[in-house]
Image (cartoon, rainbow, N blue to C red):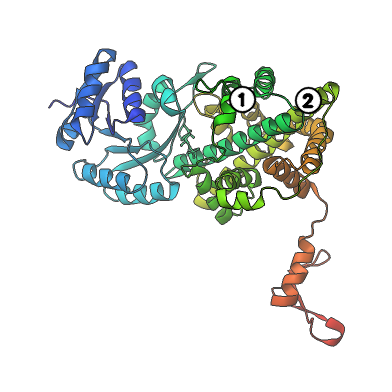
Amino acid sequence: MKATAQIGVTGLAVMGRNLARNFARHGYTVAVHNRTPTRTKALVEEFGHEGDFVAAETAEQFVAALERPRRLMIMVKAGEPTDAVIEEFASLLEPGDVIIDGGNAHFADTRRREKSLRERGIHFVGAGVSGGEEGALHGPSIMPGGSAESYASLGPMFESISAKVDGEPCATHVGTDGAGHFVKMVHNGIEYADMQLIGEAYDLLRQVAGFSPARIAEIFRGWNEGRLGSYLIEITAEVLAHTDAATGLPFVDVVADAAGQKGTGRWTVQTALDLGSPVTAIAQATFARAASSQAELRAAYRGLPGGTTRELTSTEAERFTSQVEYALYASKLIAYDQGWKMILDAADEYGWDIDLGAVAKIWRGGCIIRAAFLDRIRAAYAEDPDLVSLLSDKGFAAEITDAQVPWREVVAIATRRGVPAPAFSAALSYYDSLRADRLPAALTQGQRDYFGAHTYRRTDREGSFHTLWGEEGRTETEA
Ligand code: 6PG
């Protein structure tokens, strides 16, 4: 087998197959391999005309087909299957070669794998790939981590097959070891929050304004032309406008209202707890999916009293619609700010040098949260790379100011009417917590010192203190 392939893809399910096709369409010679060779054969038979494929039946043939330094992309299920495939190929590779994991691996696994393979002289690149099967074929957003040396050889290839926005690739070297998979995980956490916020906006327009799914689809179509414009808003209009062929009912009314989750949103929240990053909107979105799937518990709650409802006049309904737009946008801004802060917290924790503006830049296209809004974030970081919060940007601060009254009105109406809005409410409370002059955390510290002598700090002098709660006079001592 002559070594002619610039890239190899093993694992030819739809994502792997589409990435292989994307590389081939961009002029690369692509070695392709799959545990069951029939898939390899089928790919070349059906799409061989799209470019230069080298079909490999065995791992040895696959490796032999790759020019040096070998670049071998694994597209298999995250977890043990990935470990098994890495081991199968690592023993066939030589120092300087590169293994890329394009699956949704947990960043901690990627850090472990990168360290272990680095000790064998092999580069390991955990690359987040966002945009689903369509994105893999037509242009995903690609978030590779790993060594600078591996990106030197891989970067031009990823940039050529990625989505493009304003002629710029939606791919960049995110940072070392697990940084790429970490940022992909946060992308998915933000995706959960985005989807939950859209769901809450839909539910409020349905239950409070009394609009039909078709009418709400129109509203989302209109919002898609403005500052909320995004892939998720666009597909929401499509889903809400869809009629179920079997029943003639609105599609959204025949779908079981129990949300699934493959796990990346859960990982985001688990990791945020460890980092101390309060991603409250992402957490509420993840828990909302779990709550929706608690059939027995929901049955036990069903019928319990809720809020008060009354019909809105058409004028009130139109006004409410505008208020929901403000609430959705403001809540989205908070959710994104939480995600970016989490990336910053992780960069500090793991020693990654992540360009937060570049993350926004490569999320403008190709990925599931793609939106013009991300170019606003890119521009904010371009103006001030050390931005502490998106709300430190004048433009975003003005928008959150404009949203105050409607945002609070929508959360109040949702509460009064018993319409669940966990992510809207969490985003608003997060905002109010962070802008508060004083928080009840002072009382928490007093309680902790009372029952556990956990000490507290004071506002008027340095040091840690403990009050002798059980003694007369309750004097305090310097801890
Ligand atoms: C992407 C998507 C993808 C995700 C699925 C479903 O960026 O292309 O986020 O990676 O795994 O869309 O994820 P859930 O089952 O967790 O919703």
Q: Amino acid at mark 2?
A: Ser
For the N terminus, give its image quadrant.
Answer: top left
Mark 1 neighbour class, 10 Å CA radius: few under 14, some 14 to 19, many 20 or more? many
Q: Secondary structure at mark 1?
A: helix
Mark 2 neighbour class, 10 Å CA radius: few under 14, some 14 to 19, many 20 or more? some
Residue at x 32%, y 51% (from the top left corner): 116
The residue nearer to you, when weighing 316 against 262, is 316
Quarter of the view holding residue 161: top left
Q: Is residue 329 visible?
A: no
Label 1 C-beta lies within 8 Å of the nearest ligand 1 atom: no
Residue at x 27%, y 25% (from the top left corner): 6
Count of numbered labels shown in the rendering? 2
Q: Position of residue 452 (x, y in %)?
A: 69, 76
Q: Earlier in the sequence, mark 1 or mark 2?
A: 1
The residue nearer to you, when weighing 71 against 195, is 195
Q: Which residue is mark 2?
A: 322
Q: With respect to residue 190, does 157 lie above or below?
A: above
Q: Secondary structure at mark 2?
A: helix
